[in-house]
Image (cartoon, rainbow, N blue to C red):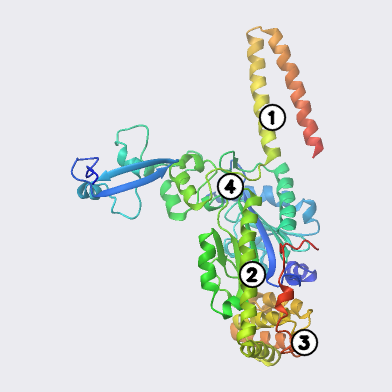
Amino acid sequence: MAKPLKCDVCSEPATVHLTQIINNQIHKIDLCENCAEQKGITDPSGYSLADLLVKPESEAAPEVAALSCPECGCTQREFKKTGRLGCAACYETFASVVNPALLNMHKGDSHRGKVPQRALERATFIDRLGTLENGLKEAISSERYEDAARMRDEIIELKKAMEAAALED
Amino acid sequence: MLIKSIFGGKSEMTEAGSKKCPVVLMTRIRLARNLSDTPFPGWAKESRRKEVLETCLPSVASLGQMKRGISAEISSLSDLERQILVERHLISRELSSNADAAGVVISKDQSISVMINEEDHLRIQVIKSGYRFKSAWGVIDAIDTALEEQLDFAFSQKLGYLTACPTNVGTGMRASTMMHLPALVISSQMEKVVRAVNQLGIAVRGLFGEGSDASGSIFQISNQTTLGESEEEIVKRLSSVLRTIIDQEMNAREKILEKDPNKLYDKIGRAYGILQNSHLLTSSECMNLASLVRFGVDLEMFPEKTRNIVDRMFIECQPGHVQYHAGDEIESGARDEFRAAYMRKQFENVARPLFNLHETSTEDDTPKSDPEQEAE
């Protein structure tokens, strides 16, 4: 027979065994009855292995219940209550909660469907333009005029391409 | 004004059903989309919701597909108008009851509707009569792409289109068909079907979506998952389940006709009698009677043109529509009276059902291959 497992917290024989999958990684924890009760595992309203395994003072994993979205102010409590997120940025803020849940409710955890091609192109254009414009300023101030000329030409080309794309629509 | 234009033209919903596939009344696809950098409607402040409405309403209304359509703020509609739009599946109950800074744009033929500030900033919907996923997808894909030119949608490379509820994230697509399954209901097999189908990630609901009952033996069957598969894969998986349900329904029909045809003829005959002669009819009874007559049309007991009357009655026997036709907001008892009178008139000239002629006729109605009917 396998050796009886010991409680991860106090080394008493463990009777509670938990497995959670977070971000595709399996987390296992074994607890004795006392520690399990203390950690609130018997509470069906939910718990997270991450909370159990990570010591409270750890910076790496802030307590999940305290999460709130910097963009819209939506809190995890609110999300739990309504099942709705506050804004697009909430998907990153609450990733540790939402991502494991996504695997349970969907056929996978990554998007395989339609992509807003034009919007993404637009975003790439604007990104590239910003980088070039910053580079140009820097090149001028540090008197690298050859680089500056090259970047200026590239900006002109890029703007032309953007206009052409807009006209196509 | 709104109501007049809604009732003026032909609509996909009232022209439903092709003879090749009697089971599928209509096909529907909806896409959930949100603007990036704006909180979702349920969490946004009133002022942000207004901004979204002011941005989206003109953008959507300016689409070629929406030419000469209807564009309205929900708060400007009367209760009756909202109810009629819900009954025609053009807006959701949620939008109708949560009307602050909410809007809708409906195409002239009522096959396209775009809700603004429902659960997501945009809910784009396309309805086609019969079984036509390909054509519905073609239309909705084009609208979505056209809107994308004007609006920046919340999208992540990893998670796809971001939605207020994580159950819609990814494609943001819900594809469904409205199915008429009288034989599965009569032979008490529906519960079994629902259970089996749920395990495959497919949801079964009543005619008016979540929480509605299945009066008239009409069920809305849709995908439950939106992430991890492409739109095409989702529709393919859904279609194979629908195919099986159609087969089951057809088998159940044959079995009923084989084992106990008189029981079925009795039901259909009585339904016809009641629709022609009753003086008080609730909407749910009316749905069930119309359902039996539709079954009769499939069995060629009634002429094919009766199908259109029945499909129209599925919608027109709803309380909002009854009140519109009555020309007044009337209470439930008066509605039952009016509804019965309306049905007597509609079924007045429908010929008596022909019995005992078509023991094997269901055979011919069974689509042999892919039931996808692209004929317009």
Residue pointed to by mark 3: B350
Residue B58: image x %, image y %? Answer: 73, 50
Q: Nearer the observer, disc 4 or disc 1?
A: 4
Distance from disc 3 to disc 2, alpha carbons, whole Å, reads 29 Å
Is label 4 on the same chain as label 1?
A: no
Residue pointed to by mark 2: B247
Q: Quadrant of residue B72?
A: bottom right
Asked whether the beta carbons under mark 3 and mark 2 sit within 8 Å of each other, the answer is: no
Asked whether the beta carbons under mark 4 and mark 1 sit within 8 Å of each other, the answer is: no
Asked whether the beta carbons under mark 3 and mark 4 sit within 8 Å of each other, the answer is: no
Q: Is the C terminus of chain B in the top left, top right, bottom left or bottom right quadrant? A: bottom right
Q: Is residue B28 left or right of residue A31?
A: right
Is label 3 on the same chain as label 2?
A: yes
Distance from disc 3 to disc 4, alpha carbons, whole Å, reads 48 Å
Q: Amino acid at mark 1?
A: Phe
Is label 3 on the same chain as label 4?
A: yes
Q: Which residue sits at x=73%, y=84%?
A: B358
Which element type, helix, strand or loop, lies under badge 2?
helix
Is label 1 on the same chain as label 3?
A: no
Chain for disc number 1: A
Q: Amino acid at mark 4?
A: Gly
Q: Quadrant of residue A88?
A: top right
Q: Nearer the viewer, residue A108 or A97?
A: A108
Residue A139: image x %, image y %? Answer: 65, 11
Local packing at callout 3 (Cα closer than 10 Å; few below 14, some 14-19, many 20+) is some
Q: Nearer the observer, disc 1 or disc 3?
A: 3
Which element type, helix, strand or loop, lies under badge 1?
helix
Residue pointed to by mark 1: A125
Local packing at callout 4 (Cα closer than 10 Å; few below 14, some 14-19, many 20+) is many
Residue B186: in sight, yes or no? yes
Q: Is residue A93 left or right of residue B34?
A: left
